[in-house]
């Protein structure tokens, strides 16, 4: 994907500290002509890690290429892709920003395969020298990566949930882009149930748009919001039915830690779904805690269930 199709860091809402650090490194790279440092982006899904990497590529004038970690199972596959993307960037007269999404799904062998290229921009097996490039890797599970691989990344930047006012700006802009009229109360209601996660805010705004358009209107009402929240099974904080049920299972365990496999079985969900979609927000809210023996409900998690009448 060509970075010129996107916009730079100034177009992004929030991320003040991360944007400041990125702007510092961008300015330094332009001054020294060094390649941008390899960068690890960590945090729950939906926080804009891909957009952030694209914006940096845009501001640097780099060619942006995105791949998924699960695509590569062997050394040859990832080396081949890296070389192909490097040659494409060269042909366009740009440096390469190689973005690996969900890098924790990258198998051990491909991780090991790019140890040396990350440091030397050279492929020993084929004696291929590459133009200097920057690798960005996004992950929700940094603990699953090989330590030598992680050490190749000079920057390790953690994403957190956004402030409510930042999400409100996103929601208002999204509803406006849909051609809908929404007052500040409506915008606040939607933002409040987005858990500080931009992707959830955009998805919820789209569902509300569908509800309004299905009635042949263009003005969003409180009723449209409440009906959508109810239909989607969102509690007053924005937790889904699965997330609430997860908390209830831990509550019933009365302090006895439960493993992910046991939780997945109780919820009738795949372990991967629990780890990638259900747990991250609960961890970031400090409603649950990881222990060596499993997950436990925290006092905050118990208070949320009690306060919302979901015990």
Image (cartoon, helix red, strand yellow):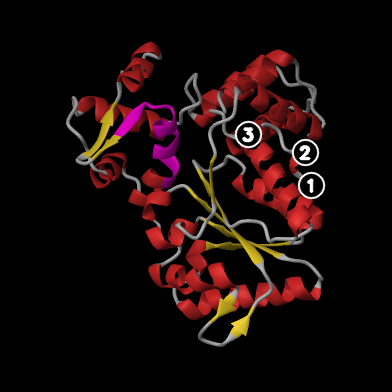
Q: Magenta includes 267? A: no
Q: Is residue 16 above or below residue 76?
A: above
Q: Position of residue 120 (x, y in %)?
A: 57, 72
Query: Which corner quadrant of the image does residue 47 belong to?
Result: top right
| Among the two numbered marks 1 and 3 on one chain, the one whose residue lies closer to the N terminus | 1
Q: Is residue 186 left or right of residue 68?
A: right
Residue assigned mark 2: 10
User: Which mark, by number, is residue 17?
Assistant: 3
Q: Residue at x 35, y 19 (%)?
A: 300
Q: Quadrant of the N terminus?
A: bottom right
Please tell me whether mark 1 or mark 3 is closer to you in this view: 3
Q: Secondary structure at mark 1?
A: loop
Residue 204 visible in the shown view: yes
Q: Nearer the viewer, residue 162 or 228?
A: 162
Q: Residues within 10 Å of mark 3 (few under 14, many from 20)?
A: few
Please tell me whether mark 2 or mark 3 is closer to you in this view: 3
Q: Position of residue 280 (x, y in %)?
A: 43, 38
Q: Residues within 10 Å of mark 2 (few under 14, many from 20)?
A: few
| Among the two numbered marks 2 and 3 on one chain, the one whose residue lies closer to the N terminus | 2
Marks 2/3: CA distance?
A: 13 Å
Q: Secondary structure at mark 3?
A: helix
The magenta stretch is 276-289
Q: Is residue 21 above or below residue 270?
A: above
Q: Is residue 6 left or right of residue 131?
A: right
Q: Is residue 33 left or right of residue 105?
A: right
Q: Secondary structure at mark 2?
A: helix
Q: Position of residue 84 (x, y in %)?
A: 66, 77
Q: Residue at x 72, y 54 (%)?
A: 29
> Given the current orientation, which residue lies at the most extreme bottom position?
126
Residue assigned mark 1: 7
Marks 1/3: CA distance?
A: 18 Å
Marks 2/1: CA distance?
A: 8 Å
């Amino acid at each position: 994907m060509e970075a010129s199709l996107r916009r730079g860091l100034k177009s992004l809402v929030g991320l003040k500290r991360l944007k400041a650090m990125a702007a510092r490194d961008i300015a330094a790279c332009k001054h020294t002509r060094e390649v941008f440092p390899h960068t690890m982006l960590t945090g729950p899904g939906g926080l804009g890690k891909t957009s952030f990497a694209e914006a940096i590529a845009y501001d640097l004038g780099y060619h942006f290429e995105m791949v998924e970690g699960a695509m590569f199972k062997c050394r040859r596959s990832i080396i081949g892709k890296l070389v192909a993307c490097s040659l494409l960037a060269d042909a366009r007269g740009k440096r390469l920003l190689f973005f690996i999404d969900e890098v924790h799904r990258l198998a051990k062998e491909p991780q090991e395969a790019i140890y040396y290229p990350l440091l030397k921009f050279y492929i020993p097996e084929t004696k291929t020298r590459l133009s200097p490039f920057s690798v960005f890797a996004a992950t929700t599970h940094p603990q699953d990566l090989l330590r030598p691989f992680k050490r190749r990344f000079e920057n390790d930047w953690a994403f957190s949930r956004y402030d409510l006012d930042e999400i409100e700006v996103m929601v208002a802009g999204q509803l406006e882009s849909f051609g809908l009229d929404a007052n500040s109360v409506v915008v606040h209601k939607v933002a409040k149930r987005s858990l500080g996660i931009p992707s959830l805010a955009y998805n919820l705004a789209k569902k509300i748009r569908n509800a309004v358009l299905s009635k042949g209107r263009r003005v969003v009402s409180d009723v449209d919001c409440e009906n959508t929240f109810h239909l989607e099974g969102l509690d007053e904080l924005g937790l889904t039915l699965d997330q609430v049920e997860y908390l209830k299972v831990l509550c019933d365990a009365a302090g006895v830690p439960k493993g992910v496999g046991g939780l997945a079985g109780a919820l009738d969900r795949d372990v991967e779904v629990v780890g990638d979609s259900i747990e991250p927000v609960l961890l970031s809210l400090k409603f649950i805690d990881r222990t060596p023996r499993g997950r436990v409900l925290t006092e905050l998690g118990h208070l949320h269930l009690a306060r919302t009448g979901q015990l």
